[in-house]
Image (cartoon, rainbow, N blue to C red):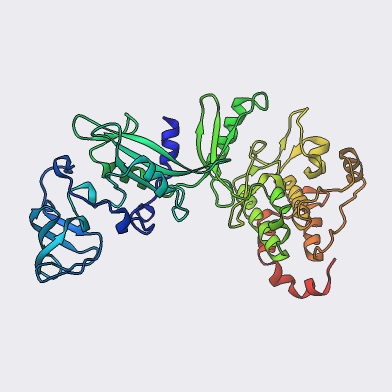
Amino acid sequence: MGSTFSILRQLRSSKDHLGTENGFAGNSLSLRGALGSDEHVLGPPNPDKDIAIAHYDFQSLNDHDLSFQKGDKLKILHENGDWWLAKSLVTGEEGYIPSTYVAKLDTLDVERWFFKHMSRKDAERLLLVPANKVGSFLIRESETTKGAFSLSIKDMVPGEGSVVKHYKIRSLDNGGFYIAPKVTFPSLQELVKYYSSYYKNTQKVAIKTLKEGSMEPEAFLQEANLMKQLQHDKLVRLYAVVTKEPILIVTEFMANGSLLDFLKTEDGNKLQLPRLIDMAAQIAEGMAYIEKKNYIHRDLRAANVLVSEALHCKIADFGLARIIDNEYTAQEGSKFPIKWTAPEAINFGTFSIKSDVWSFGILLTEIVTYGRVPYPGMSNPEVVRNLSRNYRMPCPDSCPYELYDLMLKCWRNHPEERPTFEYLQDTLEDFFIATERQYEDHPC
């Protein structure tokens, strides 16, 4: 049943349905025709019983015919074979109309996604046309089971490309329909409405799973609980948690992956300084929120920042995050990324929001060097030894002095002398306003 619902998530709103903008209502694939004894009446008798809607324009061939345009409503006065006597509710005129050009409002034929007599093979041909997006779908009568229908949906399978998946829609004794027995509907319209409205704003999700032996389930779920408490536009959003084995955290999907990986790509390497500064400002904004909530991250680096398709940056990986009053002392034996960790945290295991500020300064070097490892050429022990001698990384190539000065503020020896994330956010957001002249005059 899981696979059924995963593909049903792809149902789109009506603008993506076949038979509308996708152009499959043409004469060569006419989906109209008399339903006869197999007519599906939706509910009790209603005022729409004899009302039809035009699916194509029709120009009268003689004085007895009735001209109409696509979308016009017509009242059916008499049915006789392929030509019906009708009255236009737009013009008030009467005449004969081709029945295959219209569909009654009280039948499935009026629905743009319904292709009554289409075969499975034709459905696949139709859906696989490049103009149709992933998630385009149609419903047709089942070729193998009388009274049942089939849902055909275009999907994308990694390694295979575009495919069409088919699902049986079964009928209930009371006239309803279902794909999964636990969710039933009085009509096909309600079935489509339910899934398309429920998922019309669906976006791809990322699933983080607990690898065996990597961390305790309790700690993994603690991360999920923390993400649930921290809700901000610059933090990766948590959608759901599956607490049964295998334990999963479902978060929003960020198309460009980690900031570290993205900076090393061809697109990332093309980013100019203003865009890089903007990314840094976004990260500072997210950390300012964490600062305000009295949390610490403890693992702030480019690898733990994710980038969307629109180049929006969001902080992720809260596995080491903690809520604090002032500072937090790590347990003996805890492991940390040395090159991003503040001296007081390395030497004494003491973490605070100010140690996150130190890490942010290191992250700035990653951004302006397009993902270069901090302290290039140094091992972790060498970094620790040099920091004890007040060593600081030199200004990276092509980095404005004002930005390097901000890094140095983040790397002050005394944590209380380091800036707040609110200050860092404000400074980076106004960076080019405040430093435009100096940036031109004093490249580092």
The answer, for residue 198, to whether it is visible in the render is no
Of 328 and 154, nearer the camera is 154
Q: Position of residue 42 (x, y in %)?
A: 18, 43
- Give the quadrant of residue 310: bottom right
Q: Is residue 144 above or below residue 31?
A: above
Tell whether 428 sits left or right of 232: right
Of 324 and 304, nearer the camera is 304
Q: Is residue 33 above or below residue 93?
A: above
Of 388 and 416, nearer the camera is 388
Of 235 and 85, nearer the camera is 85
**Picture residue at 63% right of the left edge, 25% below the top:** 216
Q: Is residue 213 above or below residue 6?
A: above
**Picture residue at 81% right of the left edge, 38% below the top:** 346
Q: Position of residue 323 (x, y in %)?
A: 62, 39
Tell whether 391 sits left or right of 374: right
**Picture residue at 79% right of the left edge, 74% below the top:** 440
Q: How many marks?
A: 0
**Picture residue at 24% right of the left edge, 66% below the top:** 57
Instruction: Indicate the quadrant containing the N terminus: top left, top right, bottom left or bottom right.
Output: top left
Q: Position of residue 145 (x, y in %)?
A: 28, 31
Q: Is residue 55 above or below residue 60?
A: above
Tell whether 209 sits left or right of 304: left
Q: Position of residue 164 (x, y in %)?
A: 44, 42
Instruction: Indicate the quadrant containing the C terminus: top left, top right, bottom left or bottom right.
Output: bottom right
The answer, for residue 308, to whether it is visible in the render is yes
